[in-house]
Image (cartoon, rainbow, N blue to C red):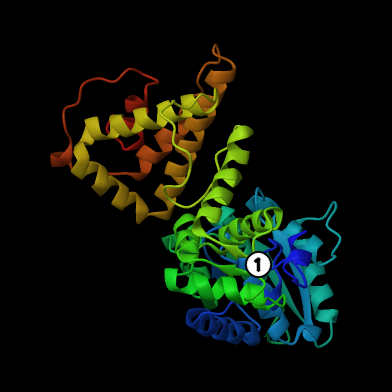
């Protein structure tokens, strides 16, 4: 469509990652250097993180092109919804190792045999959606990264994930894995003064000429304002702007044209009952409360838990309790477990109102692991069995 009108060789703002169109800022150049160094090491973990749409996949493709790929045996796995018990099987299958009917140690032995037989080719495992991994799943990946033969590591692991992955790796239980990270890089959104360079760089890669297509004052600023500097969002709205220009046969596109493109783009989502996940402040606003029959009970229970915590212990005690649990991997797992129980109970009650709640062994276990000084105990009003306050008090050993 608009490619012919503006005499472009291809679509400059396509969403599919293309290494030829990587826009390198000074930060990108420095980060790439560290990551290339990490991959050249051939061992341990390399970590790539960033918000959704900042170009993690594109960066990884550039990295792989800049190292000697002919000496790499590359496997890629998506870890979303893969639990710890299935990590080794998932990795082995990605490298072409049979896994059906085998115990984990047999899979590992076969994986070592497969990778040891690949002469002069080291293995690189790319793990997508790594922020969804549990600590147990990451520990399984660390075990895989420890595989070696003749004194050399057989597998290097690249963890690719959203910003939450950094928080996950900072947990105390992840100290062993952190010590094996040889390089890491966090992608940030583009700054306002980088957006014009990004847009023009993408256009230049497809033969852009300013006499065929130009942008009026304020267009770049408005693109940044709407996109928050997220490259994927910039690509989305610039693609729509060029389409609008083609339909109206405009060679110079103005801020007013961009506003029209934004309105039309967001209206398409609204017409389907969706809300576009755009930049801060750009999502359509609504005063109507949530109407999802599954979401509402969950939100109500979350709010009840928060109120019960503050009513039972006060703001200062809640902050202290959470700090205490943040420093204990075992306690963190217990808190995660009881939150999962709460969510499941809420969903069951919503779908089957007569379903009785399950016993509370999680709370009893948590109580056995938490000790409080006698002078720190308070006299609290009795809580009804089964209520959020009751469960929380048992969780923190208050009853």
> Along the line of sight, which residue is nearer the eye, 216 or 26?
216
> Along the line of sight, which residue is nearer the eye, 105 or 236?
236
**Could you say whether the residue bearing mark 1 is in a helix, strand or loop?**
helix
The residue at which mark 1 appears reads as: 57
As drawn, 385 above or below 85:
above
x, y percentage for residue 240? Answer: 64, 55
Q: Is residue 157 visible?
A: no
In the image, farthest residue toward the top: 354
Q: Number of numbered discs present?
A: 1
Quadrant containing the N terminus is bottom right
Quadrant containing the C terminus is top left
Left or right for 264, reference 103 = left
Going 55% across and 54% down the picture, which residue do you hit?
Answer: 257
x, y percentage for residue 289? Answer: 44, 26
In the image, farthest residue toward the left: 375
Label 1 packing within 10 angstroms: few (<14), some (14-19), many (20+): some
Q: Quadrant of residue 12?
A: bottom right
Going 79% across and 85% down the picture, which residue do you hit?
Answer: 71
Q: Is residue 250 visible?
A: yes
As drawn, 42 above or below 112:
below
> Along the line of sight, which residue is nearer the eye, 41 or 279?
279
Going 65% across and 48% down the picture, which residue do you hit?
Answer: 81
> Along the line of sight, which residue is nearer the eye, 261 or 289?
261
x, y percentage for residue 299? Answer: 44, 30
x, y percentage for residue 224? Answer: 47, 62
Left or right for 314, reference 139 = left
């Amino acid at each position: 469509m608009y490619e012919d009108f503006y005499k472009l060789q291809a679509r400059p703002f396509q969403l599919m990652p293309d290494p030829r169109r990587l826009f390198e800022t000074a930060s990108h150049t420095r980060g790439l250097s560290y990551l290339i160094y990490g991959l050249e090491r051939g061992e341990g973990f390399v970590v790539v993180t960033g918000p959704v749409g900042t170009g993690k996949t594109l960066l990884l493709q550039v990295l792989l092109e800049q190292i000697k790929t002919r000496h790499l045996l590359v496997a890629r796995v998506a870890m979303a919804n893969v639990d710890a018990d299935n990590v080794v099987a998932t990795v082995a299958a990605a490298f072409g190792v049979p896994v059906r009917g085998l115990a984990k140690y047999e899979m590992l032995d076969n994986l070592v045999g497969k990778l040891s037989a690949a002469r002069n080719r080291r293995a690189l495992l790319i793990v997508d959606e790594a922020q969804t991994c549990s600590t147990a799943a990451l520990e399984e990946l660390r075990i895989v990264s420890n595989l070696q033969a003749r004194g050399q590591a057989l597998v290097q692991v690249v963890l690719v994930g959203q910003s939450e992955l950094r928080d996950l790796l900072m947990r105390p239980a992840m100290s062993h894995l952190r010590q094996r990270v040889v390089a890491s890089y966090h992608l940030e959104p583009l700054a306002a003064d980088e957006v014009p360079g990004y847009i023009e760089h993408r256009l230049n890669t497809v033969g852009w000429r300013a006499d065929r297509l130009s942008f009026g004052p304020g267009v770049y600023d408005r693109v940044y304002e709407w996109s928050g500097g997220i490259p994927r969002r910039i690509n989305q709205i610039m693609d729509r702007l060029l389409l609008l220009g083609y339909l109206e046969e405009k060679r110079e596109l103005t801020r007013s044209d961009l506003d029209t493109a934004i309105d039309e783009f967001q209206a398409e989502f609204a017409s389907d009952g969706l809300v576009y996940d755009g930049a801060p402040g750009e999502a359509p606003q609504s005063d109507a409360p949530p109407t999802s029959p599954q979401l509402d009970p969950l939100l109500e229970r979350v709010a009840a838990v928060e109120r019960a915590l503050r009513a039972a212990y006060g703001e200062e005690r809640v902050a202290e309790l959470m700090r205490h649990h943040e420093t204990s991997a075992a306690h963190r797992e217990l808190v995660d477990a009881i939150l999962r129980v709460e969510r499941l109970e809420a969903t069951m009650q919503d779908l089957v109102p007569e379903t009785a709640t399950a016993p509370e062994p999680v709370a009893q276990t948590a109580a056995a692991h938490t000790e409080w000084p006698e002078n720190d105990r308070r006299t609290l009003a009795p809580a009804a069995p089964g209520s959020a306050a009751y469960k929380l008090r048992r969780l923190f050993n208050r009853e």
